[in-house]
């Protein structure tokens, strides 16, 4: 299974998905590498082998989302293996995931927003929270904004990248880097509301001031 995983990535993923997705696939598959399942021949793998691993990981506290990612990854790997004549059926078809824990999405009330901003008033980058709260953007989208994305005349914000903190391989340390938005639909244009525009103009003023004070250390990011 480990050998087919490497072939699967090379044949069907590399060059087609983001490097962060490749790394996430490796992280997801790592539980199989630590288990005897990873050393089994494709033709010998049965549904109960995968079910045992899923149950064991669930008992260890793995979330429903993580287990679903693992099952989906294995299922797609087996599907491609069947297409290549390496096995006859997909064992994931008989694998059952644990019931997901349901939780209702909570929205902050106006009073809670006021309390939050009061508590964060002394934070050096308070504007990040203000833009986030006024637009509903993901935090990575807010941090990934460039001035070229903001049209003060047309009153729009174009979201076309996100700032990511992590790594793309086990050999490197975590660092900040830009990547494309989470999904294609995440690339969108949203209205620039007056309160958001006011905050962003203050950020621009602060940035110009700091650029003047620290011109030698200032670095432009492409």
Image (spheres, rainbow, N blue to C red):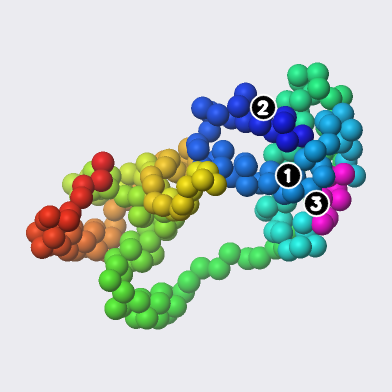
Q: Name the residue under label 2.
A: 7
Q: Mark 3 points at which residue?
A: 54
Badge 1 crowding class, 10 Å Cα cut-off, few under 14, some 14 to 19, many 20 or more, is some
Q: Give the range drawn in magenta.
A: 49-56
Q: Mark 1 points at which residue?
A: 33
Q: Which of marks 3 and 2 is nearer the N terminus?
A: 2
Give the vertical position of 206 relative to 97 (above or below).
Answer: below
Comparing labels 3 and 1, the label whose residue is closer to the camera: 1
Residue 118 at x, y percent in the picture: 34, 80
Q: In which quarter of the image is the N terminus?
A: top right
Q: Earlier in the sequence, mark 3 or mark 1?
A: 1
Is 140 included in the stretch rendered in magenta?
A: no
Apparent side of residue 11 relative to residue 146 in the rendered image (left or right): right
Quadrant assignment, res 106 = bottom right
Q: Which of marks 1 and 2 is nearer the N terminus?
A: 2
Quadrant assignment, res 29 = top right
Q: In which quarter of the image is the C terminus?
A: top left
Is 54 included in the stretch rendered in magenta?
A: yes
């Amino acid at each position: 299974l480990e050998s087919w995983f490497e072939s699967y990535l090379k044949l069907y993923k590399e060059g087609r998905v983001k490097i962060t997705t490749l790394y996430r696939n490796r992280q997801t598959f790592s539980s199989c590498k630590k288990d005897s399942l990873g050393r089994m021949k494709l033709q010998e793998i049965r549904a109960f082998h995968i079910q045992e691993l899923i149950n064991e990981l669930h008992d260890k506290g793995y979330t429903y989302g993580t287990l679903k990612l693992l099952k989906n990854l294995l299922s797609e790997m087996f599907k491609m293996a069947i297409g290549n004549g390496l096995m006859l059926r997909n064992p994931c078809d008989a694998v059952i995931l644990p019931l997901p824990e349901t939780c209702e999405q909570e929205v902050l009330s106006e009073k809670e927003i006021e309390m939050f901003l009061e508590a964060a008033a002394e934070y050096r980058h308070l504007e990040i929270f203000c833009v986030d709260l006024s637009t509903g953007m993901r935090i990575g989208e807010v941090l990934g904004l460039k001035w070229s994305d903001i049209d003060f005349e047309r009153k729009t914000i174009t979201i076309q990248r996100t700032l990511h903190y992590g790594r793309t391989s086990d050999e490197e340390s975590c660092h900040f880097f830009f990547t494309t938005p989470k999904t294609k639909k995440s690339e969108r244009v949203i209205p620039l509301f007056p309160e958001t525009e006011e905050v962003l103009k203050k950020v621009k003023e602060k940035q110009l001031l700091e650029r003047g004070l620290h011109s030698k250390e200032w670095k432009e990011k492409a």
